[in-house]
Amino acid sequence: MLEKDVEARGLWSSKFGFILAAAGSAIGLGNIWRFPYTTGQNGGGAFLVLYLICIILLGLPIMIAELAIGRHSRRDPVGAFEVIRPGSPWKLIGYMGVTTGICILSYYSVLAGYTVGYIGKSLAGNSTSYEAFTSNPLVSIPLFLAFIVITVLVVQGGVKNGIERWARILMPTLMVLLVILIIRSITLKGAGEGLAFYFKPDFSKVTGSTVLAALGQAFFSLSLGMGAMITYGSYLSKDDNLVASGCYVAFFDTLIAVMAGLLIFPAIFAMNMSPDEGPGLVFKVLPRIFGLIPGGRIVGAFFFILLSIAALTSTISLLEVVTSYLVDEKHWLRRKAVWIVAAVTFLLGLPAALSQEGMVPWLAKLPGLGTSFLGFMDWLFGNIMLGIGAVFIAIFTGWVWKKEISSKELREGFPGFDRIAPVLFFLLRFFCPVVILIVLFFIFKAGV
Ligand code: TRP
């Protein structure tokens, strides 16, 4: 592609801009909602250790591979595989990614809608329970719709003005507020027990399903396995160091997840709640922490504003994957693409929005599966499909894409790449595919 076409398509304004946007994609409800409740359900400390191992040995290599595929091809996920292996079935991985993107976006926006609702709920000091709040369709559906519309408005603005500008202000603010809240949480009476649960691993509790959960959470949290990082990498400049950028993004994402745990677990134990509440955990615990802080309503509202924004920088990346496909491959106007995708997402998300206990019974408990429609979507698309996508991305980068070319791509912006190349290629060729395939096998054996 010519230099001027690359610019016209869009580039990040700086290395820092990319890191913020990619960290914005990675940091979201996955860190603050999904990570704590999954850790709570899987025994605490031991899960944390497994999660960190998954991030470093599986997440990082795949992240670097996705960024390299994206920057090399300068295309959306479907186009990227087509550029590197023209006419081959590899572009199916791209189609799978685009589909997974819309599906995750649909239920993720439902949850993001709750987060927005909690802004008003905190401010009003309204004490409705999580269950009652989320099972009211007159609340959840309009909020869900509003969230999609906001996402569309940002993505319509394109890469530089839309996505980057938002991430730049909001992500640092979130971090500061988290620190303040953590200080409150760990100084509660009885917090020590929570810290022990979180930091003292008890490996006797580790089972196959703990490993599955850790792996799925690592991919979900880093936004891997469906081409989001291929898309974001496609707007990176050749001066950027892909390995270092990937490490920064993974570091910030992990930091925020670990901080979210540090906020939630001491409070859970101090308040005699149970850590294995499931998906409602964070929505139930946080308001109680705010209740203990002077000006708690305002602090609470502010926290949910920031959480909504963290969710927004994630939904933006999900929508951007699908949009970039329609713009790059189908030559649609960006404006048309975003609105049509939004409409499809809304329809796909409706059953998830109606799947809380007390709404539509068979959606709240899918026949034969025993989980809600939202839970099922998260299991299928947020775990399995990301795992499958990641296996193929590892195999593609390790075995199919010519090593001289991928190495050349990785060397741009990182002249010392050859020193780490053997480790990276070993992980991509052998370690990632084998480990993820074993884990997927066990997921299928275990069921939903
Ligand atoms: N990583 C985000 C979070 O933790 C969610 C997300 C955004 C995502 N884009 C993604 C997950 C792409 C998987 C793939 O909340």
Image (tube, rainbow, N blue to C red):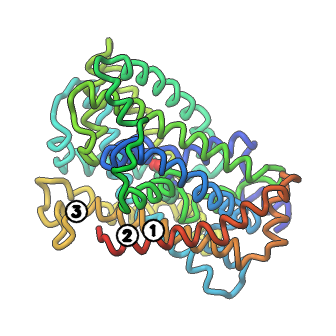
Which badge, 3 or 1, comes first in the chain's sequence? 3
- Category of crowding for the residue at label 2, using alpha-carbon neighbours closer than 10 angstroms: few (below 14), some (14–19), many (at least 20): some
Question: How far apart are the two marked residues, 2 and 3, measured between alpha carbons?
Answer: 15 Å
397 lies above or below 193: below
Question: How far apart are the two marked residues, 3 and 1, measured between alpha carbons?
Answer: 21 Å
Task: Please give left or right for residue 279 compared with residue 28 in the image.
Answer: left
Residue at mark 3:
371
Residue 87: % across, % down: 68, 87
Residue 203: % across, % down: 39, 48
Q: Nearer the viewer, residue 242 or 163?
A: 242
The residue type indicated by label 2 comes to: Ile
Under circle 3, the secondary element is loop
Q: Which residue appears at 68% of the width and 63% of the height?
A: 65
The residue type indicated by label 3 comes to: Thr
Task: Please give left or right for residue 26 compared with residue 397 in the image.
Answer: left
Say whether residue 157 is visible: yes
296 lies above or below 58: above
Residue at mark 1:
439
Q: Nearer the viewer, residue 220 or 218?
A: 218
Q: Quadrant of the N terminus?
A: bottom right
- Category of crowding for the residue at label 1, using alpha-carbon neighbours closer than 10 angstroms: few (below 14), some (14–19), many (at least 20): many
Q: Which residue appears at 23% of the width and 26% of the height?
A: 271
Residue 7: % across, % down: 78, 56
Q: Are marks 1 and 2 in contact (CB under 8 Å)?
A: yes
Q: Which residue ends up furthest to the right in the rendered image?
A: 415
Which badge, 2 or 3, comes first in the chain's sequence? 3
Under circle 1, the secondary element is helix
Name the front one of labels 2 and 3: 2
Q: Which mark is residue 443?
A: 2
Q: Are marks 2 and 3 in contact (CB under 8 Å)?
A: no
